[in-house]
């Protein structure tokens, strides 16, 4: 029992409390290029493994951060809820829009009740360069391919292949991802047009 208490205290001081403290100190700041970079740089040491260029907006929730692996140049928008207990890999250049939920565990039932039933865990992977639009939910054990767009409010319940557009509840492949020709690359491009 004593060893278990010591382990939990160590875990809290090593990961959970520092993440909470960083968010407490920075969540009152407006989200802009400087503060999302600052928040990402301050959070990197407390996540499982994390590449450079992490951008984190306000009110992002990390559960079980030891199981979260994040690649380079990843953006986590406001209100994302990310659970790493079953193992979560977010590869390079992934963008999560506001209020995306990624869970690597699901509740189990015992005696017709979820109370006391425990949990089932399985890893989740989000492939390189993918974009999950607002309010997407990704459930336990799912793999989202590279270069994928998942439409807003979709619930991803099964694997999605590379380079497609998926949407719906449950999410299904709508078709190949269509690349558009950009007309802006930076804020300076917007200002030039005024």
Image: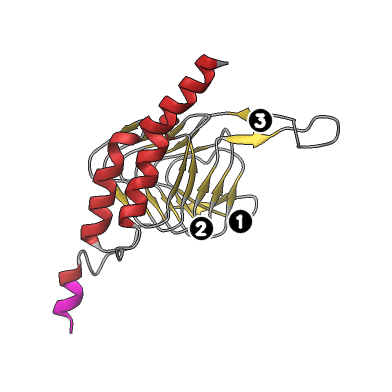
The residue carrying pointer 2 sits among few (fewer than 14), some (14 to 19) or many (20 or more) residues within 10 Å by Cα, namely: some
Which label's residue is closer to the chain start, 1 or 3? 3
Please name the residue that numbered disc 1 is placed on: 168
Frontmost residue, 71 versus 131: 71
33 sits left or right of 135 in the view: left
Mark pair 1, 2: CA separation: 7 Å
Quadrant of the image occupied by residue 67:
top left
Q: Nearer the viewer, mark 1 or mark 3?
A: 3
The residue positioned farthest toward the front in the image shown: 2
Residue at 80%, 29% in the rendered image = 110
Q: Assess whether mark 2 and mark 1 are in contact (beta carbons under 8 angstroms).
A: yes
Q: Assess whether mark 3 and mark 2 are in contact (beta carbons under 8 angstroms).
A: no
The residue range painted magenta reads 189-194
The residue carrying pointer 3 sits among few (fewer than 14), some (14 to 19) or many (20 or more) residues within 10 Å by Cα, namely: few
Q: Is residue 69 visible?
A: yes
Residue 88 appears at what percent x and percent y? 46, 34
Dominant secondary structure of the residues highlighted in magenta in the image: helix
Please name the residue that numbered disc 3 is placed on: 119
Frontmost residue, 163 versus 32: 32
Residue 189 appears at what percent x and percent y? 17, 72
Vertical order, 125 against 55 (above or below): above
């Amino acid at each position: 029992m004593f060893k278990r208490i010591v382990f939990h205290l160590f875990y809290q001081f090593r990961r959970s409390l520092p993440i909470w403290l960083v968010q407490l100190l920075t969540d009152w700041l407006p989200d802009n290029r400087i503060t999302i970079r600052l928040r990402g740089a301050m959070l990197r040491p407390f996540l499982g493994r994390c590449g450079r260029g992490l951008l984190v907006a306000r009110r992002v929730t990390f559960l079980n951060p030891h199981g979260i692996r994040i690649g380079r140049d990843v953006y986590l928008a406001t209100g994302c809820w990310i659970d790493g207990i079953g193992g979560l890999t977010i590869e390079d250049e992934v963008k999560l829009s506001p209020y995306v939920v990624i869970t690597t565990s699901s509740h189990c039932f015992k005696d017709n009740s979820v109370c006391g039933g425990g949990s089932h865990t399985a890893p989740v992977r989000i492939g390189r360069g993918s974009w999950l639009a607002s309010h997407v939910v990704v459930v336990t054990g799912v793999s989202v391919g590279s270069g994928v767009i998942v439409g807003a409010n979709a619930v991803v319940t099964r694997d999605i292949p590379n380079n497609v557009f998926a949407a719906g509840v449950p999410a299904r492949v709508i078709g190949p991802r269509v690349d558009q020709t950009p007309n802006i690359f930076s804020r300076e491009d917007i200002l030039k047009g005024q």
